[in-house]
Amino acid sequence: MKEHGLAQFKWIPDSTRRVLLLFSCLWGVGCFRASEPTGNLNPTTNLAASPELLALGKSSFEKNCAPCHGLQGDGKGPVADRIFPKPRNFVRANYRIVSTWDYQPTDEDIFRTISRGMPGSVMPSWAHLPQKTRWALVHYVKSFARMPFEFGPDHQPKDITDQPSGMIVIPPEPPYTEQAQAHAKQLYSINCASCHGVTAKGDGAQKQEDSEGFPTRPRDLTAGLFKGSPEPREVYKRLMGGLPGSPMPSHPHLYGNDGWDLVHFVRSLSSEEQRQRVEAKHQQIIATRVTQLPAKPEDPLWDSTPAVELSLLPLWWHDQRPEILTVRALHDGNEIAIQLGWTDAAGQNGTTPTQILPASAAIQFALSAKEQPFLVMGDNTVGGQVNLWMWKPGADGQDSASDWTARGFDTLTELSQDSVGLSATTRHEAEAYRVIFRRLLKSKESSRVTFEPGANIPVAFVVWDSGAEDREKAESMTIWQDLRIAP
Ligand code: HEC
Ligand code: HEC
């Protein structure tokens, strides 16, 4: 089973795990100032709802989730208009990721989805939040539901007419023999090809709607995108239970070996690498100290600087989007240089021949190292302010770098150019951008970030590609990452 952080060491006692976590912080892998294990996708405990937990859930939800899901949990937060697929409506509670035959999620299902996020949408991963906060969120989002969550007794289907209920109990996994492969292809063409297409690229029945009336599409199964984990046992549950609220039906008649043959077939359509690329992970970027910063984007010093690859989440899902952002960082004790790299078919002046939409990019820093503000432009709580650096290609080949601050969605304010000397240089070659931001390490102003050697700074990235219909729909972002300034 694929997990992040220390959850894989389940056999280690908790006290030892905390010490290990501390060490892993020092090594710089997946640490977030927490007093309990974070980072794992699967829960190691199950915390029942209590007034205290619901209060914690409410405060975390209002800061981290309400901008998308709405204060009332109806999926109509202020950001919702700008994103597609749309945020879940927790009042109607059509949860997609379920482990039951009753079209209902278990608490663990919701916990895992919150932890991992939903690749294929902008639903971020919240694995960095302490387990307790994630349990609090599970109970708080459940509390919005109009109808109670009810499960029938555990009953697995015996034949085509038998109505199953309760937990989906996964039968033993058979080997994927040549015979099983041929059988899976047959099952696929009968049960799945009408929607997912003969090629499995999602090119079957196109005009589909979800239960809220929003357009949706059968998944391109060759893209390696699993909203509910690509792990074989999870895929089994998706095929059996369906994705409630979407056109993806449940398939109780395929329970048993047929289901497993199809799981193997579906997974054979994508590679492990594709499946890994779409996982939004919290990583550390180290700004290494050098004696002299490279003057140009093509300086070989950049190639020898370690790169961190970050998964980009498009706000408005489109096929021609950049998937990965590569980040490198260096400093010389006086200035910092951060290099961003991504593929974009745009030309030298930032636009494709058929489009007038320029590509651009931004880096967002949290101003308080103790807080992770709301991901899209911060929030108005203490420590919620962010500083953004924006790059735009100029029509005449002159790049522009601008400095901004925000305390929440729609509060973006430009800062005057001053002594910190923010600049950006670019190179566009072989359909790939390399943009380098450069600035003095220190600033005396509270709305600009300061980079103290030895400090860790929450950082996130935004890219607007030139392949989308309009600028709003061109935006892709990463989740919060950790930028460490080497001493
Ligand atoms: C930037 C917008 C955004 C933010 C912030 C966000 N979500 Fe979501 N969330 C989404 C979208 C979009 C979906 C639906 C994705 C889909 O159906 O493909 C979703 C789906 C979900 C689901 C549904 C899972 C299922 O099985 O259907 C849960 C639960 C959820 N979010 C919880 C949270 C919690 C808790 C937070 C805050 C800690 C949060 N979300 C923050 C956008 C967001
Ligand atoms: C009626 C149309 C329809 C049929 C039939 C159908 N699917 Fe789907 N399937 C969908 C749609 C639509 C989605 C995407 C739902 C979403 O993203 O919210 C989907 C999603 C999926 C996913 C992604 C699960 C995840 O974790 O994200 C898999 C895997 C899948 N289908 C496999 C199959 C297989 C195998 C069959 C046949 C046994 C099948 N589907 C039959 C419409 C269909």
Image (cartoon, rainbow, N blue to C red):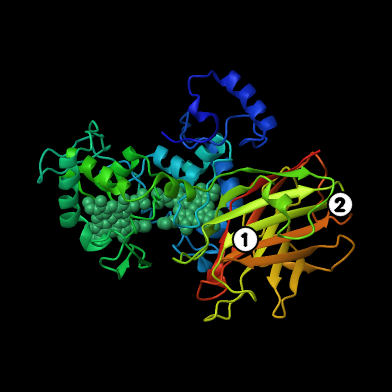
> Which is nearer the eye, 129 or 50?
129
Disc 1 and disc 2: Cα gap in Å?
23 Å
Tell whether 100 sits left or right of 435: left
Give amino acid for label 2: Lys
Q: Position of residue 299 (x, y in %)?
A: 73, 56
Mark closer to the chain start, 1 or 2 = 2
The disc labelled 1 sits on which kind of residue? Val
- Image side of residue 245 versus residue 442, left or right: left
Numbered disc 1: secondary structure? strand
Question: In the figure, 259 relative to 26: above or below?
Answer: below
Splitting the image into 4 quarters, where does residue 105 fall?
A: top left
Q: Residue at x 45, y 62 (%)?
A: 86
Q: Is residue 429 left or right of residue 380?
A: left
Q: How many marks?
A: 2
Return the mark for residue 153: none
> Image point 48% across, 31% down: which residue?
47
Asked which secondary structure carries label 2, the reply is loop
Q: Position of residue 313 (x, y in %)?
A: 52, 57
Q: What x and y, as percent, mark residue 297? A: 72, 60
Quarter of the image where one finds residue 345: bottom right
User: Is residue 249 in sight in this rendering?
Assistant: no
- Asked whether residue 396 appears in the rendered view, the answer is yes
* Front residue (pair 474, 271): 271
In the rendered view, would you say 441 is above or below 173?
Answer: below
Determine which of the numbered discs, if any, sits on residue 442 in the image. Answer: 2
Answer with left or right where residue 416 lies relative to residue 155.
Answer: right
Instruction: Find disc 1 in the rendering and name its residue.
Output: 462
Instruction: Pick the residue in front: 283 or 238.
Output: 283
Q: Which residue is outermost to the front?
A: 300
Position of 308 relative to 314 (above/below): above
* Label 1 neighbour load within 10 Å: few <14, some 14-19, many 20+: many
**Where is the N terminus found, in terms of image quarters?**
top left
